[in-house]
Each structure stands twice: as structure tokens, then as C-alpha cells.
Amino acid sequence: MIFEAYSQYYDLLYKDKDYVGESSYIHSLIEEYNSGTKKILEFGSGTGIHGNILGSLGYRVYGIEKSQSMIDLGESTNSFSRKSKNFSCFLGDCQSTYLGNDFDTAISLFHVLSYQTKDEEVMAFLKNVQTQLRTRGIFIFDYWYAPAVWEIGPTLRIKKVANTDLSITRIAEPECFEEKNIVNVHYQNFIENLSTKSISKIEEIHKMRAFNNEEIIQFSTRAGFSLLHTEEWMTSLTPGNNTWGVCSILQKN
């Protein structure tokens, strides 16, 4: 399962991710598009950092995460600095797990939609979201934006991170299928124990789908949503050919 093998290293790999800024951004979108929100459903909650920060802002957040290892890490004492009594996480799948039909807002961050690479997977995900929202509830999510992905082009990337115990080198090599809007990202993770100098290797393939605006409209309409707004992730700018990450807001009809 994706993320299962290296879940224990996940927070180190993404220690530079601006979780506070991203949570503040989501909060601002909720305030603009569904200001009465009290109850949030988060798909792909990972180790729970976003959910805990949003919980600390007063929302009651319920997370769904498919990796038990990620949930276990999130429940450990050192996985994040801000824990909230307003966040709970459940093991499940974004396409089928059902927690109720009274959520005001749903969110999925870090390109959860782009991991749904087949049309039927996209529809299953969106319909599952739709059934759990109140009427006029909203869904906020980010994804890879196809015009920018193919204009910029996926490239080989190398990332190095470390703490007092470990040093990790991560190599990401893309395999592109532009006609299908699919990129298979081959990850090689080299983990060095700084005490013993031993090195282990973890390999995974992340199959990602990029979407254009027309596809988002078509899928969301079929699932019972209306598209309210689309913008560049973390800004209010209109998506363009240099906008790899895009955020859309749907409203349940």
C-alpha cells in the first residue's frame, strides 16, 4: 500500500510543508464559501496534522485514512506539535467509507483526488463525499492541473532531509503518459541510520492523474455537485500553465 512502507519517515520527509499556512488557507475558504461550518470530514488525513490544526480553530474534524501506520504515527506523542480534542481519525477508504450524512464541509488535501486515476474511482470518491454532506455543503480539494503538468513537464527530483537520527535521500523519477493524463512517479528512498551508518532502501510507485477544468466540471456534475470556484493552491490567482497545484470548491446540489 502507498505510504505504508515509509509512514514512519513521512513527517520527516515533509517537515518543510507549511501545515499551519495550509490550514489557515482552508479556514479562509470555509469562511468565504460556508461560514456556518462546524463539522468537517477530511479524506486522506495522513498523520492528522491538518485535522488537528483545524480542530484547534474550533471545528470538529473527522478524518479518514487508509494507512493504519499513518494513523498510528499520528497518535504517537511526537508526530505533531498541536493536538486537538476536536480531531478523530478512522481507518478507511475515500471511495467507500461512510461516517454519516451531516457534515458541513469536506476536504481532501495533498492531491488525494489525483490518486484516483480511473474514471470510476473519481466518481466513487466524489459520490462518497456527496452522500456525507448536508445540502449546500461544500467540498474543498486540491489536485494536479493538467495544462501546467504538461507545460512544465515532470522531471527527476532529488530531496534530502535529516534529523538527529536519520538522513533520507529521496529520488523521484517520473514516467509520463500524457494521452491519459497519468504520471507514474517512481520513488527510491535511501534511509541512513546516523548512529549505525546502516542504509535501507524503500521503493514505491505513485500513480497520479492530472485533471483539466472541463473534467472537474463533468465529474462534479455527475456526482451531484456544482463547481463554485477554482484557483491556484494557496493563492487567489487564476490557474495557468505554470500552476501545477490547483484548488477547487464544489457545493452539493
Image (cartoon, rainbow, N blue to C red):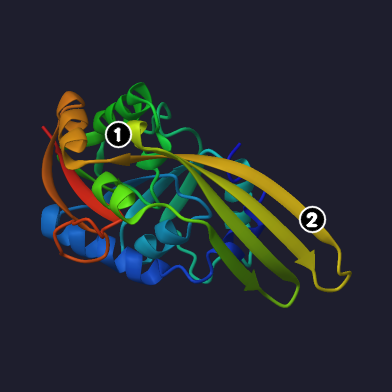
What residue is shown with label 1? Answer: 129
Left or right placement of residue 68 versus residue 113 in this view: right
In percent of the image, x 21 and y 48: which residue is there? Answer: 248
Name the secondary structure under disc 1.
helix
Name the secondary structure under disc 2.
strand
**Residue furthest top as drawn:** 120
Kind of residue at badge 2: Ser
> What x and y, as percent, mark residue 110?
40, 52
Q: Which mark is residue 200?
A: 2
Q: Quadrant of the N terminus?
A: top right
- Name the residue nearer the viewer: 50 or 56: 50
- Residue 86: tell me if it is visible: yes
* Within-10-Å neighbours for mark 2: few <14, some 14–19, many 20+: few
> What x and y, as percent, mark residue 146?
28, 45
> What x and y, as percent, mark residue 31?
16, 61
- Name the residue nearer the viewer: 106 or 142: 142
